[in-house]
Amino acid sequence: MSFPEQFFVYIVKCFDETFYIGSTNDLEKRIYAHNFLKSGAHYTKIRRPVELVYFEEVKDLSSARKREAKIKKLKREEKILLIKKNQKKLKTDRT
C-alpha cells in the first residue's frame, strides 16, 4: 500500500529580512537543511538563520512548482500580506 506524497510551498524569512520561496515534499527536513546543512540553498546558507513564516500544502510536485513561481513574482508587500493571512495556521500547527 502506498500513500500519496505531500508537497509544500513555503516561505522562510532570512536573517537579513529577505524572503526565500521554495517547494518540497518534506518541509521539516528542508527547513533544517536551510539552517544547518551544506546542501541547503546557497541563498539561505549565507543568510542564516532562517525562520519558516509561511507554508501551504499542494497536491503534487507540478502544482508546487507552479505555486512557487507565482509567489516569487509577487511584490514584497504582497508576500508580507500572504504571510500575515496565514500566521494563525502556523501558530496552530506548532501547538
Image (spheres, grey):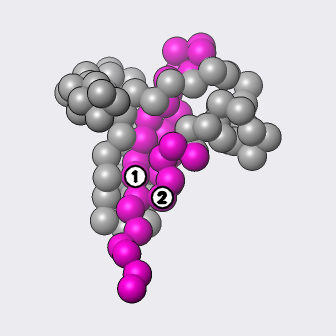
Image spot of residue 29 (x, y percent)? 57, 46
Q: Of all residues shown, which one is farthest toward the top?
A: 16
Q: Residue at x 66, y 22 (%)?
A: 48
Q: How many marks?
A: 2
The quarter in which the C terminus is drawn is top left
Residue name at image x 79 percent, y 40 percent? 38
Q: CA distance from mark 2 to mark 1?
A: 6 Å
Whether residue 70 can be seen here: yes
Q: Classify mark 1: helix, strand or loop.
A: strand
Instruction: State yes or no: discs 2 and 1 in contact (Cβ < 8 Å).
Output: yes
- Going from the N terminus, do you reach mark 2 or mark 1 first? 1
Q: What stretch of residues is rendered in magenta?
A: 1-29
Quarter assignment of residue 77: top left
Determine the residue located farthest toward the bottom in the rendered image. Answer: 1
Image location (x, y in percent) of residue 74: 35, 35
Q: Quadrant of the N terminus?
A: bottom left
**Amino acid type of the residue that numbered disc 1 sits on in the rendered structure:** Phe
Q: Which of these two is toward me, 84 or 76?
A: 84
Report the residue marked by disc 1. Answer: 8
Q: Position of residue 19 (x, y in %)?
A: 50, 27
Does the magenta portion include 20?
yes
Q: Is residue 39 magenta?
A: no
Q: Residues within 10 Å of mark 2 (few under 14, many from 20)?
A: some
Mark 2 — residue? 25
Instruction: Mark yes or no: residue 72 visible.
Output: no
**Mark 2, secondary structure of its residue:** loop
